[in-house]
Amino acid sequence: RAAMSGVAEGQAEQRSAAKATPSDRVDAFVLTGFLGSGKTTLLASALADPAFADTAVIVNELGEVGIDHELLSFSSDATLVLPGGCVCCSIREDIEQALRDLFEARDAGRIAPFRRLVIETTGIAEPLPLLATLHQNPLALARLNKPEIVTVLDGVLGEATLGAHREAQEQIVHADKIVISKSDLIEPPARARLADLVAAQNPWATLHEADLTQGAPARIFETTPSRRPEA
């Protein structure tokens, strides 16, 4: 029965993927950042903006769960909370099921169409296992634009965090965009030193600064045009 269920799910993914055209693809973002960096506050701020009403969100339910879910619960019906672990390879089936649920609801008209998907990981998660899952999933390959990794780095504690935690370093190294949060709390010399440290670890990422009391910079959750396939 389990094998038949897997076959049925695979067939459903293929049918859903067959409906997609390049213009139907959804921009995808993996939002990461070490514990306390402010990534959930940043995401909640973005979702409070009417311009982000067409955003689906998948959040985890480990560690920061109560805070994450409460902050994000207002965003839309297209918010899924994954139980029991970080959004990483250990719950690969959960992330794949979440994608199926979202796109089935979207295609059936049970939720409003969304053009952007944000997957928020736990603070201790490395982004590569999640990307590997997305790269191997037929539905993700057919319905998502190439995901961008957005890493939020605590502007006050970032230097110490990078020096002490390998996971934080991995989040920076693999990021497409890096947001230095709490910029209003950093003196200019410290801000410049942290920016230089980040650039040394990942010179290709675009760097943003964010005062978490003022909302999210608009360009953080906009996909680079080169990541969208030609129509």
Image (spheres, rainbow, N blue to C red):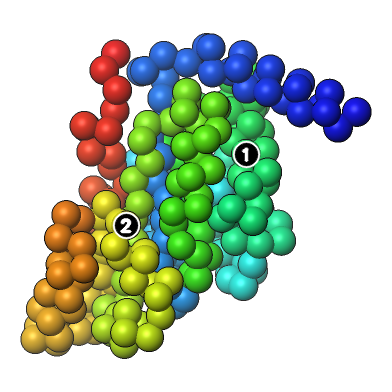
Question: What residue is shown with label 2?
Answer: 174
Q: Secondary structure at mark 2?
A: loop
Q: Residue 134: where, in percent of width, then height? A: 50, 39
- Is residue 74 visible from the viewing direction of this image? no
Disc 2 marks a residue whose amino acid type is: His
> In the shown orientation, is residue 221 left or right of residue 165?
left
Picture residue at 68% right of the left edge, 43% below the top? 93
> In the shown orientation, is residue 44 left or right of residue 206?
right
Disc 1 marks a residue whose amino acid type is: Glu
Which circle, 2 or 1, is nearer the viewer? 2
Q: Nearer the viewer, residue 134 or 72?
A: 134
Q: Which mark is residue 96?
A: 1
Picture residue at 76% right of the left edge, 28% below the top? 6
Q: Residue 146: where, in percent of width, then height? A: 36, 35
Give the mark nearer the N terminus: 2 vs 1: 1
- Residue sitting farthest toward the right: 1
Q: Write down the quadrant of residue 170 in the picture.
A: bottom left
Q: Nearer the viewer, residue 180 or 197?
A: 197
